[in-house]
Amino acid sequence: MMRLKRLGVMACLLCSPLSVMADAQREIPLCCQGDNRVFLAFGEREGIQQVMQVFMRKLMADERMRPFFQDSDRAKLVEHLTDQLCVVMGGGCQYQGRTMAESHQGQVIKREHFNALVAHLQSAMDERQIPTQAQHKVLAVLAPMYRQLETQ
């Protein structure tokens, strides 16, 4: 039983992007399907939204990151990011936004930008007191997304 539990955690940590939307046109990475513990650890959708609000504040305070977001509707972006993470965590949300490629078309996103974004996300999760294990599960799913951006 314990071995199966460990295998489930490992599978979650190593999961790769899967198409999870009924829309089938939007690909969002998914982790821990059928296990809502990460979603609950974040405080469900409301908690995810609070993390995303802190995250956006941190991005806008960073001179390297501000240019990517300064012309966007940040409230709408927070909603989209909230829905995306809710889907990643298996929270039952629906994401109606654009794909990663559509959202970042024409932008030059370097590894340093992606690393800064991840650092701000970690900082936002820490500020909202998200348990480290839940953070790691989400970050393990999001990390491969850089490959979707660097090929543009």
Image (cartoon, helix red, strand yellow):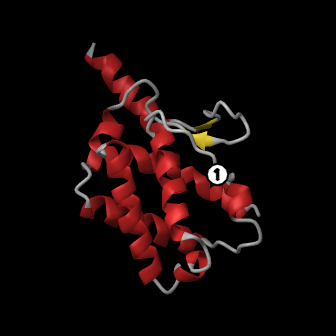
Q: Is residue 56 visible?
A: yes
Could you say where residue 4 lies in the image, as x and y percent from the top left? Answer: 34, 17
Kind of residue sitting beneath label 1: Gly
Residue 87 in the figure: left or right of residue 133: right
Mark 1 closeness class: few <14, some 14–19, many ≥20 residues within 10 Å? some
Residue ID at (39%, 43%): 137
Q: Nearer the viewer, residue 67 or 32?
A: 67
- Give the labeled residue for mark 1: 97
Could you say where residue 110 lies in the image, as x and y percent from the top left? Answer: 63, 73
For mark 1, give the secondary structure.
loop
Give the quarter of the figure containing the C terminus.
bottom right
* Residue 59 to residue 122: above or below: below
Residue 26 in the figure: left or right of residue 111: right
Number of marks drawn: 1
The residue at the far top in this view is 1
The residue at the far bottom in this view is 63
Q: Is residue 135 visible?
A: no
* Residue 65 to residue 28: above or below: below
